[in-house]
Each structure stands twice: as C-alpha cells, then as structure tokens.
Amino acid sequence: MPTLQEVRFRVVTGRKIRDDFAAHFCPLSMSSRFLSSVFASALLAALPAIGRADVVEDLRPFLKAHCIECHGPEKEKGDVRLDGVIDEETLASVFDVIDVRDMPPKKATSHPSDDERQQTLDLLGAHLAASAERPLALRRLNRAEYENTIHDLLGIDTPLAELLPEDGSTQGFDNVAGGGLSISSILMERYLEAADVAFESTIRRIEPLPAETRRAATMESKENIDSVKKKKGGTIQVADSFVKFSPGWPPVRIDDSHPIEDGVYRCRVAVWPLDPGENRTLSVAIYTGSLFGPEKKRFEGMFDVTGTPGDPRIIEFNARFKAGEAIHIVPWIYPEHVTWRDKDFEKQPGVAVKWVETYGPLDQEFPSLAQRQLFGESPTIHLQEAGTVYLRHRKNVASHEVISDQPREDAARIIRELAPRAFRRPVEDATIQPYVDLTLSRLDEGRTFEQAVRAGVTAVLCAPQFLLLNREADVDDYTLASRLSYFLWSSMPDGELLKLAETGKLSDPFVRRAQVDRLLADAKAERFIENFTGQWLDLREIEFTTPDAKLYPEFDPLLQESMLGETRGFFRHLLTNNLSITNFIDSDFAILNQRLADHYGVPGVTGHEHFQVVNLPDDSVRGGVLAQASVMKVTANGTTTSPVLRGVWVLNNILGKPSPPPPPGVPAVEPDIRGATTIRDQLSRHSEDASCARCHARIDPPGFALECFDPIGGFRDRYRSLGEGDAPEGVRKARYKLGPGVETDGEMPDGTAFADFTDFRRQLTERPDPFIHAFAEKMLVYATGRPITSADGPAVDALVARAQKDGLGLRDLIKAVVENELFTLP
C-alpha cells in the first residue's frame, strides 16, 4: 500500500493525464505529404471506479459527521454533493482537501480528530492507488533531445531545435509522455524540414580555405580611434590598448578579426585592467554573433581581466561563426566606480583590450567527417563538382555533390547501416526494407544519387522508431539503454550502452548503477543539470522578466549570469560529491562568485569567472535553493514580489502539494509599489471571501516567508517604493525610496507558526519528508518520461526508502531511480 505522502499530488494530477500515441506507420510510397500525416493522437487515459461503492459506504460516517452540512441536500457548496453517488474524480478531490486540511473549514461545527483524519486518508489513498491505471511511457523526443540525438548520430552541430515548436510539459517536465509531446501533421512537416537541414549539414560542398590567423590590434580600428578622439562613452588609449570605462553595452568590437567564412574558429582576446583599485575585479562578458540585426548573441563566457599592458591575459575559446559574425567584448566593472574626478578618465577603473585574434576554420576535412560517417569510406563514393558559387571573399568557387560509381549498392548500404544506429537497436530486414525501397525508387525516377540518399535518410529520421521512445510492449535491454542515456544525456545511447544491451547486461540493476557513474562523468551530463534544474526550479524563465531599473539599479546581466551559475553549480556540487538532497532546503555553504557574494553581503570572495564553495556562518539567511537569487527572480515579475506566486511555487516545486487554480473571475492581487498599502493588508482583505481564504491559508504562509527577498534575490527588511517612503542611505542618486517594512511571519494550516524565513526553513529541515518525497517523485518523472499516478505509490515509497538508507545522497538517489521498478516498466 502506498504511503499517504505518495498518494499526495498524484490523486489530483493522475486523473488529468492525457496521452497521444502514434497509430501506425507505413513508409511504402512515402512522400513528404504522406509522411507529415503518419502520426495521430488517439488515447484518453481514464481512471476506473474499481470498488468505489464499497469505499463510499466506508466513508459515510466521516462524511455525515463533517461534510454533509455544507455538501448535502440543504447546502451544495461548490456544486459538490457527498450524500449520494460519488464519482472517482470527486473522491480524489475529497482526499486532496482533507490531506491539506482545507476541509472541514475552520469555522465548521465539527472537526475530525487526527486519528480519524488519518484513517480516512488511508482508506481513500488505498482505493485511489488501487483504482488508478499507469499510463504508458510512449512519447516522442522533445526538441532538445531531437537536436542532441541528430548531432550525436550524424556528427554535426547545426542548430535544429529552433526549427521545431516549443514543447509542452506534463507534471512539470517537457520529456514526459502526455499532451505536451503529441505529434501533429504540422509538427511532422517541421520534422521533415529539420531532417533535411541535418542531411545537408553532413556535406561540405565547398573546400574550406586553409586555416589562417586574423589578428587585429584594437587601436588600428578606425571606429575605436574615432571613439577615443571624441572620448565617446568614456574611452581612451593606453599602451596601444583600447580602454573602456563604462560597463555593459555597446561592446568593444574589432571587425578586422572577424572570420570571413563559416566554420569553427579558435578565438583569443588580450585584455588587462587599468587602475582597478582595491577589492574590485574587472571582467569581460564575451558574446559571438551577428554584427547587426535582431539575432540573439551567443554567450561564450565571463572572464576576469588580469595582467599588465606588457603581459595581458589571453582569453581563449572555440566558437562557431557564420561569415561576418563578430566577437563582442562587454566590459564589466564591479563594484562600479561612482566618483567622477573632473573628467580625469585615467583615474577611473577600465578594461583594456589590446588585440583580438581568430584562427581557422579548424575543421579542414574535405569531404567532411560527418559525410564520411554517413556515406561510409567506400572507394565508390566521391565528391564531384556541380557548378560554382559566389562568396564575399571568393568568386567562382566550385560547389560539390556526392556521387557513386555503384549508386544502388551504396544507397542500400547507407540506409541499412544508418537504421540500426538511428533506431537505437538491431533492426530486422523487413523493417529496413521499405526505407531501402524508397531510396532506390528515387534512383528509378531519375534522381541523383545524393537526392535518393537524402530521401531515404530523411525518412529514417522521421520514422516512429527514431522519433518515439518506449515503443516496445516489453522493456528489453535496448529500451533500458535509451532510458539511461535520455535520462542523463538527453540523447541516444553510446556504443558502450548498446554493447551492454547486446549482451543482456543492462537488466542487472548493479550494471545500471555503474553506468550512472560513467554517464555522469561525461561532459554530456551537463545537459541533465541544465534541463532538470531549468524545469524543476523554473530557471528557463530567468530571462522572462527585466527588473525595473529605477527600483533595482544594481541589477545587470553579469548578476543574472551569476544567478544561473550559482544554482547549476550548487546542483553540480551535490551531484559530484553525493551530498544529501536536504541541502536543497538548507545548507551551510553556497556556490558563489564575487558578483553574487557582494550581492548577498558575503565577504572574502574575489573573481567573477569561477564559482567557489563558500562556507556560510550559522546565522546566514543564505543556504539552500530557497535563498538563491535565481529562484527569487523567476518567482517575481521584475518590479514586485507576490506571496501568492511564491507560495504557489513552494507548494508545487518544493513540497509537492500543488494548489488548485483560483476561481474564475477572481482578480490577482497586485502589490502597491507606491508604498501606501502593505501586501499583507491587501491579501487579508482578499481572503475575506471564504472561497479564497481556504486556499490562501496554504499558499500565503510560505510566500510571506520569502518576502525578505526582493525580485533580484537581495535581502530586505523594507520594500522599495517609487512613491512614499524614506531615501535610502549610502545609495548614490537613488530613484527609489524605502517603503513599509517587510513582514515574514506566518502560520501553516496545521497551526505551526514561524517568525521569519530562517524559522520557516528550519521547520522544513526538521520535517523533511514532504520535500524528500516530492523531489524523489520529480526525479522519477524526469527519469522515466512517464507521469506519476497514485498507482505508483509503492514504487515511490521504495525509492524514498532506498535513498534514505543510502543517506539521501543525490547521486545515490539517481542510482536508486535506475534500479526502481518504474524505470523498467513499459
């Protein structure tokens, strides 16, 4: 029987699960129009009402004593009656409101004892778990998995995810079977387009220029010389270097160093600090991308500026460029120098850029390695000139196509070799033959060898065996290989996993545990860190809001990058060192760079580039994810914070007790940034409505606990205001005022009171079970790609028990996940 904690949440979400599955697939006589309509969604998973009459009769005494007064023949609040036939969905709702103590309401005339309440929950929980059906794990690749898989399969790095629409999510993740990963005819058209782009990317049609070094001194740039002459934006020349004093955009750019053709280049930037002063670290954020236009720049990294004019720091990195794209060097001076000395620019701290260099293209293979991997090393396959093209720096350049001396034999071989790798398992001849026939039919129609192979490869990359995971009715070792790799790499299994599958060793849970260590040691495991934290903690939404510059002038892009670095680094530190997951609630350390440490008021940290493990004092408000600026930013709107939004976030993401949506037509409570009314006063009036009060009794307390953090994660004891209030001390030219004091005390629905955030966090630490269960469940959802229902209670119980036995280490929990029965179910 599942425990009470395991039935929580799933009894609500389980009844809402909708799965879309592929109906069938027939690649014979395939065309793009036919292929785009291959898939259809068909199945609605419903929960049966097994034994409902029996459980309702057992519930009658409880319902009569505590519920019928408001949900019977005389009253029918919320259109819910509990005196007659009760359907499965209503039973699930009854469980939920009793579990979170929403019902009976405080003003009710009768309340159950703790024992009576527990017995009722056990009765309902057992029924709901027994009557729930497990949805299948069949799903398609999400767009990140699609791109990673194509890259690893074909050996290319062309961006593909942007060609596909955004994925929906189920139970908080976009890699879970359900409506978020359905397949439509429109999506199939996008897959066809992406597969065509992927095939084209394997062929290098133009022989690359020999690798060359393009180096440019900053003070040889006419744009920089003019800027210095006009002292534009606070710039000067020192020791043959271009010095910029004002932080942020516009960047330093040296056009003569830009690559002139597409490719991967090694980049080097020489920088040094001018008059940094004490306790100040100068740094540069480096981006690559288009010179002009709306294209988003690619962030390459944050680098500390050290060295001297004669011995500058040389920053090195590799990056892919399109012809004419640039390196954008954005100086950051922090803490910012605020005292101007009669325009004596030399006394100001500044970032000096001496020269910039690119070398490449690095990939000189012709034919490309990706082409040789796809088409094979056959002596019958060649590149042949097929006309000329005009490039900006080269005229009448020969373009090439792939030809074969034995087109039918080579085309069939290419498809037969590709299919097992693309389908991630051995493939029977009968399954491969339709793709071979399609390819050969193109040759029969008079198409070129390359066009025929393109048709066959595109068909393979749009096949259900490629696009869908967990298709097999019985889970075998090849299914387990894919589950491991898509869990921790978001991509296809490598050769070692497939070899283990071939020998049947992945059925052994000890072998799977060992593979966890190997997979996590690979650089591709960064995808797991980014994808899991990005969705569990909503880090993907970090850019959705821009803090108000008047209220929060200290916010800058360097701080935002540091926020992400802290949270990902924190997760990575726990994962690498197998530390307890309870550190997510509270920890005696943080992962900080100087920018974030200064923001938090933590002394002794220098440098923005590298994050450090910093021990926190016992009375520190920091520690755990709830005190991290990234979480505080994604739970605010950039201008204000809301206890409602943050409270809902804590219930959903940390405690696994999601709150229902607000009733229709109820307006949101907007904090008063004029400083005239406190948010507690506003919510108190809002909660006078009984229908609102019930949910807000759960939502508001954790939300108020977090009110000590502003929208950018800074600690505060007073709100900032653009209207009434006092001028802040020690803040130069502040455009905001300090408004009402922040109230962070509250009382949980069970009557437990807390004085402030640290007291609230202490209580979570002392009673960690809700978080442990919620986190284990989220990891299971992400790992298995299936929604969790009440039928999965015993499996989640087993996972938690194993994790607790192992000390709750994050890595050990992941190993327990791959041993769990849910990891091996269809």
Image (cartoon, grey):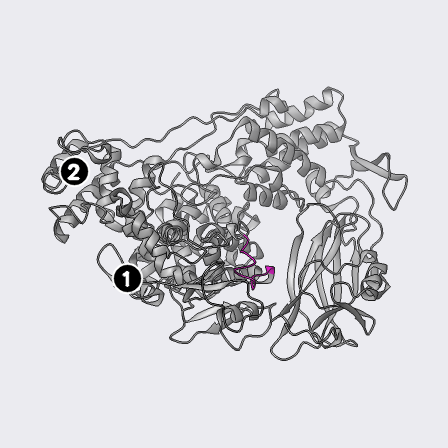
**Which mark is nearer the camera, 2 or 1?**
2
Q: Nearer the viewer, residue 159 or 797?
A: 159
What's the CA distance linking mark 2 and mark 1? 33 Å
Specify start and end residues of the magenta stretch as a single range: 546-557
Residue farthest right in this picture: 396
Q: Position of residue 475 (x, y in %)?
A: 42, 39
- Tell me what residue is drawn at x 53 percent, y 46 percent: 498
Other residues around mark 2 within 10 Å, as few (<14) / some (14–19) / many (≥20): some
Q: Quadrant of the C terminus?
A: top left
Q: Amino acid at mark 2?
A: Cys
Q: Position of residue 547 (x, y in %)?
A: 53, 56
Q: Nearer the viewer, residue 652 or 264?
A: 652
Q: Main secondary structure of the magenta part?
A: loop
Q: According to the image, label 2 marks what residue?
A: 70
Q: Nearer the viewer, residue 623 or 111?
A: 111
Q: Nearer the viewer, residue 512 or 180?
A: 180
Q: Is residue 776 magenta?
A: no
User: Mark 2 falls on what kind of element?
Assistant: loop
In the rendered structure, are the residues bearing label 2 and label 1 in contact, judged by CB atoms less than 8 Å apart?
no
Other residues around mark 1 within 10 Å, as few (<14) / some (14–19) / many (≥20): few
Q: Position of residue 41 (x, y in %)?
A: 46, 27
Question: Which numbered dot is residue 767?
Answer: 1
Residue farthest front in this picture: 724
Q: Amino acid at mark 1?
A: Arg
Residue 376 seen from this side? no
Residue 359 seen from this side? yes
Question: Relative to residue 226, is residue 588 depicted above or below?
Answer: below
Q: Position of residue 570 (x, y in %)?
A: 48, 63
